[in-house]
Amino acid sequence: MDPLRFDGQVALITGVSTFGLGLAYARLLASRGCSVVVNDLGRDWTGSENTPGTDEAVRLIESDGGTAVGVTGDVVDEADRIVRTAIDTFGRLDVVINNAGAGGSFDTMVDVHLRGAHRITEAAWPHLSATGNGRILNISSNGSFGAPALPGYAAAKGAILSLTRTQAILGKRIGVRSNAILPAAWTRSTAGIEQPGFGEFMQEHFPPEAVAAFAAYLLHADTPLSGEAFAVGGGLVSRVVQAETAGALTDDHTPEAWPALIDQVMAPGDMIVSKSLWSQLDSFVGRMSPQTRADWDEIRVAPDVDGKVKA
């Protein structure tokens, strides 16, 4: 198989420190011909300020023979300037990796992880569209399954999955693809977990380069996937979906109807995976009564519609 190359392309990667996933993404893409713009604000996992990693990241990439520039800035308040650096320096933008993250308060984590990903993508969108084959990679987390000690982190990373699916729908007609990964790797954030032996375990079994390899595959121009999410780490990749059970249907619209039906509601069976709100509604109505389905067919909104419903 021919190597997956990124010659002549430009990538913007946010949250690039001096080690961890951001740097691994940037170094791998640069090693395969991509010009990279690396961004960092300088904020540790406690939310405190530290020295931005941009200059050192650029040095490391260039020492490998790659092409890179750095831009220090806040992904929420300075997204336009960060994206403009890529355009002013290289004249185009093909790839965005929304990797920036931070600890701290609930609001800080939602701002950096979620609002930052949205703002950077919003600023980059016309440039990604202009290439006809723009690609976005949003970094979610297994924290999206629930993180008792970090509700802000869990909320933001869960929302990233919905943001990714929406970007994929909006990008379908203009050649922009968006996917998300839930990485397991040795990073600045996992380095802060104090469980004895955890750091050594992560360093041995979950190098960031293993995640970067799959990320580069998702971001390659020939990879058609969009609107998907994957758990990635240590060489293992699995698809992550938001799914429904087949459920239970009753004409008895009282609370007393549900004790006898709740086991049917909860039974996994064949899970149903929907790609959009209209896809979910179409599937949901399809499991209802014949009359409901017939009435829906009269006014049905196509499952793949990407615009707002108009009155």
Image: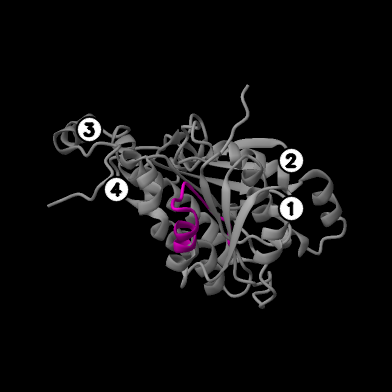
Which residue has dot 2 on it?
234
Rendered residue at 30%/37% (across/down): 304
| Residue 76 on image: x %, y % | 47, 69
Tell me, yes or no, whether the highlighted magenta stretch contains residue 92.
yes
54 left or right of 202?
A: left
- Crowding at mark 3 (Cα within 10 Å: few <14, some 14-19, many 20+): some
| Residue 189 on image: x %, y % | 70, 62
Q: Which residues are magenta?
A: 83-100
Q: Amino acid at mark 2?
A: Gly
Q: Amino acid at mark 1?
A: Ser
Dot 3 or dot 4: first in sequence order is 4
Q: Mark number for residue 253? A: 4
Nearer-the-camera pick, 119 or 281: 119
Give the Cα separation between the discs numbered 4 and 2.
49 Å
Residue 154 image-quadrant placement: bottom right
Which residue has dot 1 on it?
63
Dot 4 or dot 2: first in sequence order is 2
Q: Amino acid at mark 4?
A: His
Rendered residue at 25%/47% (across/down): 307
Give the mark toward the camera: 1 or 4: 1
Q: Mark number for residue 293? A: 3
Mark 3 vs 1: CB contact within 8 A: no
Give the Cα separation between the discs numbered 1 and 4.
68 Å
